Amino acid sequence: MGKKKDKAKKLKGADKTAMKTDRKVNKKIKKEMTEKGEDDIEQLIANFVEQDKKRAQITEEIAEPPSPRCNMSLTPHPENDELLMFGGEFFNGNKTFMYNDLYVYSIKHDEWRLVKTPLVPPPRCSHQAVAMQQEGGQLWIFGGEFASPTQSQFYHYKDLWVYHISKKQWEKINAHGGPSSRSGHRMLASRKELVVFGGFHDNIRNYKYFNDVYVFNFETYTWTRVEPSGPQPAPRSGHQMAVLTDGRLLVYGGYSKVPVKKDADKGTVHSDMFILGLDAKQGDPVKQKGERWKWTLVKQCGVRPTPRCGFSLATLPNNRAVVFGGVLDTEEDDEELLGTCLNDFYQLDLAKGKWQDLELKGKRSFEKKARRRKKDKEEGGDDAMEEEGDDDAGEEEKEDLEDNLNELKLKDGSTTASELAEHPTQSVNDVSMHGPQTVYDDGVFKVSMGAASHSALGDHLTSPTTSTEQIVRPSPRMNASMAFKRGILYLYGGVSEEKEKETTLSDFYSIDLRRMDEWRTIIAGDPSKMEWIESSESESEEEEEKEEEAGEDNREDDSNEDGNGDDDEVGACSG
């Protein structure tokens, strides 16, 4: 008994010590924020809430397109030809801005409407949004994070909200037992439930990544934590999830880090894939709630994307999904990472775990196909044309989508498994114009990096299929939002990274996946909105680098003057 009491005392003592430490740290942080002229983060959020409450009524007005932002949600309306954008963040190199505005984009009229209500979720980014058809249409929001203007403080949410689209009203759902505060998680609707997986929490002092699974029931409005059987995915955030036609969920990629020593962390970019679904072997799922879910590791095949973070994914019909962009970080030295943003385009067969590198055909290729189809109809006679009729138009579009996604070839310059066998010395430094390519053979992959000299305002690259035609595609980026509606894929904003400079974007693109010709620019990038303010620390570092480079140049000049000029010329020629 004595030992148990002593152990309990030790635990209580440890708790008290931890509480004292937290109080000291919080006091120190508040003092630092006061010196910077910044309020406590909870007070900052409270100020936003009070400001929103001052609105007397609900308004919806035609507005300018959303400002530059990333890590927002872009969700297809469950019925109408509209997209709903909520939240996001913008960093200009000196200050962070957080948003909680709700925009509605009308696809038919190509216009944005801004909805303002007295009750609205506080500003956030890296949250999750899911649209449902029930009760005239709903938009469900969970979690996310708020960063102070100086990024010295972070607050993670664990609140659940629903926006009733037909009523234009937000409602906060008070349901206990849900996921802890987090951002970077993923949430999807499967059958009559919301499923949340993963994410992370960071309060500057420490951080934690999650691999837990929570389910919210739409009928009972209750949360349940489930503990699936099978191989568990490692804790992660920034991954992607897609729902299959049978209700199972696919999880791919993500990022996590662990501390290795004081003030040093080791990051991991995940490229594994899992399926989460009901375990048919467990019998009645109602009687065995804790065991009815199961993880299954997916063996991927095809031309897989290089490991990356911040990529975008949209789910298509018939167990298909498309992936765009992201960032590939490589170690420049022990302390710095070099980020290479990407704008490559992949298709994923969700049921088979098969990847395919998508190639844009260009307008000429599509127009040629259209002329051929028209000629075939004319040769078939009037009867054949009448038989098709207007009722077959939708089916024809569906066939076009399937044809274009199933029959695409690898881009020129991509590497096959047989080529790797013939050229075993191929390395990360091999270059092709179309971005990174990865081929996996028996679990081993090799990467050939593509050129990263793309403008933040967009690309007009030469197509691999037509030597003279210029094909429009979005510039390389990460943390953009992507949504699919009626055969069209939409892409908005994100961040373009170049060394220390992170340019937040506000451009808007679409591509007809039934044509796969090229991206259409809906809103071009505006240089005047791409604000970046160099911090005093960055400027001083640049000055130091310039001074070091100047010193090296002077030393080289001195050595050349002292050395033998003829020998230098021989060395240059022989090299």
Image (spheres, rainbow, N blue to C red):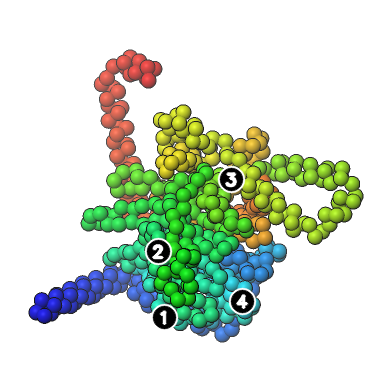
Q: Residues within 10 Å of mark 2 (few under 14, many from 20)?
A: some
Precedes in sequence: disc 3 or disc 2? 2
> Marks 2 and 1, Cα distance to the nearest angstrom?
24 Å
Q: Earlier in the sequence, mark 4 or mark 1?
A: 4
The residue beneath circle 4 is: 134
Give, as a three-letter code, the residue at label 3. Leu
Q: CA distance from mark 3 to mark 4?
A: 35 Å
Disc on res. 58: none
* Vertical order, 497 against 75 (above or below): above
Gap between marks 4 and 1 measured at Cα = 23 Å
Q: Quick one: SS at disc 2?
A: loop
What type is the residue that disc 2 sits on?
Ser
Q: Is residue 92 visible?
A: no
Can you give x and y, in whole percent of width and height, for residue 20 in the image?
20, 75
* Rendered location of residue 545, percent (x, y): 32, 43
The answer to which of marks 2 and 4 sits earlier in the sequence is: 4
Q: Residues within 10 Å of mark 1 (few under 14, many from 20)?
A: few
* Label 4 secondary element: helix
Element class at badge 3: loop
Of tags 3 and 2, which is closer to the observer? 2
Q: Are marks 3 and 2 in contact (CB under 8 Å)?
A: no
Q: Residue drawn at (32%, 32%), measured in percent from left and top?
A: 553
Residue tagged 1: 176
The three-letter code of the residue at mark 1 reads His
Is residue 352 in view?
A: yes
Image point (62%, 79%), residue name: 135
SS at mark 1 in the image: loop
Q: Which residue is mark 2?
A: 229
* Mark 2 or 4, closer to the camera: 2
